Amino acid sequence: MLAALVATSLGPIRAVGQAVESPPASGTLRQAAKGRFLIGAAVSARGLADPRVADLVAAQYDVLTAENEFKPASLQRQPGRFEFATADRFVEFTRAHGMKLVGHTLCWHSQSPPWIFRGPDGKPLAREEGLKNLKAHIDAVAGHFRGKVVGWDVVNEAISDAKDEYLRKTPGLRSIGDDYIARAFEFAHAADPDAELYYNDYSNENPVKREKTIRLVRDLKAKGVRIDAVGMQCHLILSDSNAIDRLDESIAAYAAEGVKVAITELDVDVLPRRGRGADIGALEKDGANPYKDGLPPEVAEAQARFYARLFQVVLKRPGVVNRVTFWGTQDGTSWLNNFPVPRRTNYPLLWDRALKPKPAFAAVMDVLGRP
Ligand code: 9MR
């Protein structure tokens, strides 16, 4: 099936395909990256239920992340009532296909049930109550998936975007205090001692967040807390031409702290943006939607060059970047069709809406294939 997909990409159906000067590379990302780093993707339960997506995913990637199904709101909507059935399908799928699985995420201010850190009045729970809920969640979830996931995004997006603020004022912080992050890592380690533990965030290729991330890594290490890697989401924007240089510098800075780096949510937004990051919204309210009838070949080519540069940076430091995970597989189901402006037509990934590989796929394969 995969061979067929690659072959048909040469057909004249889409303008994007016509722009490719040489035929798209054959083979898979997984083969191409072998022995250097793991290559992964986020997929939703709905995506996995589509046989064409399931085939593509099983052929191309070493490791999966569930796009929403391991988040606290999915697993423990009501206190003490854990719902693992949907998440367990990811365990079965990855096992059946000889793949690894990453857990995303144990502690996040978004997609979490409010009662974890807040009372019925909306006020922060007392520290001991908040700690008890955090521990109960992590014990149950990391315990359930013990031996089934290779690692956890233990805490997600806890660093502030504000220039003069270190940590985001999340419900967890307001209830427990600054050390909720360290405690989450300790609980995760106790529940699954073999799992790798990651701190995951967006925009941490940028200097301001990089410095705060380094502060956090040092703080955790000083407390004797296990942290294996910084997860760099890398929701990047095509027009931000310096992003790759900042990424390069930041990978070096994290490596110097003695942690690995995983690129955890990679995509390259091709639409106009006024602001940056994964957490803006109001600014973009009336954002333009210029490519609703197709991605112009020159934009597809620019995106291909952008991805190629990114993978060159990844390959520069063997053993430091140990995983690159895309946030999705095909353009049609990417979150970026609805963020920061709802219902636009975006093209952030390596496969198009018909599951045909784009120029960006060929470009990545080309970089990975070079000696
Ligand atoms: O892709 C996810 C989307 O389906 C959800 O609606 C959204 C809810 O916040 O979360 C998206 O995934 C996010 C990830 O969990 C954390 N980093 C930013 C991702 C994109 O928003």
Image (cartoon, rainbow, N blue to C red):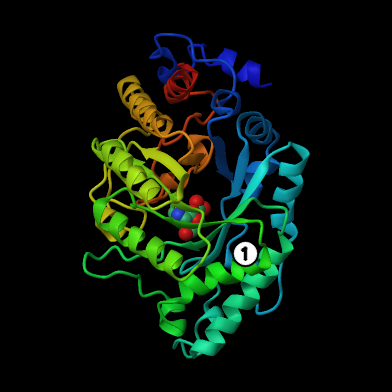
Residue highlighted by disc 1: 74
Can I make out residue 328 in this image? yes
Residue 228 % position (x, y): 51, 54
* Residue at (32, 58) in percent of width and height: 281
State yes or no: Cβ of the residue under disc 1 lies below 8 Å from any atom of ligand 1: no
Q: Is residue 283 left or right of residue 168?
A: left
Relative depth, front residue between 366 and 12? 366
* Residue at (70, 49) in percent of width and height: 90
Residue 87 % position (x, y): 69, 56
* Residue at (47, 24) in percent of width and height: 361
Residue 81 % position (x, y): 71, 75
Crowding at label 1, few (<14), some or many (≥20) Cα neighbours within 10 Å? some
Q: Is residue 63 left or right of residue 245?
A: right
Amino acid tagged 1? Ser
Name the image quarter holding residue 63. Answer: top right
Relative depth, front residue between 371 and 243? 371
Residue 214 % position (x, y): 34, 58
* Residue at (48, 30) in percent of width and height: 350
Relative depth, front residue between 323 and 308? 323
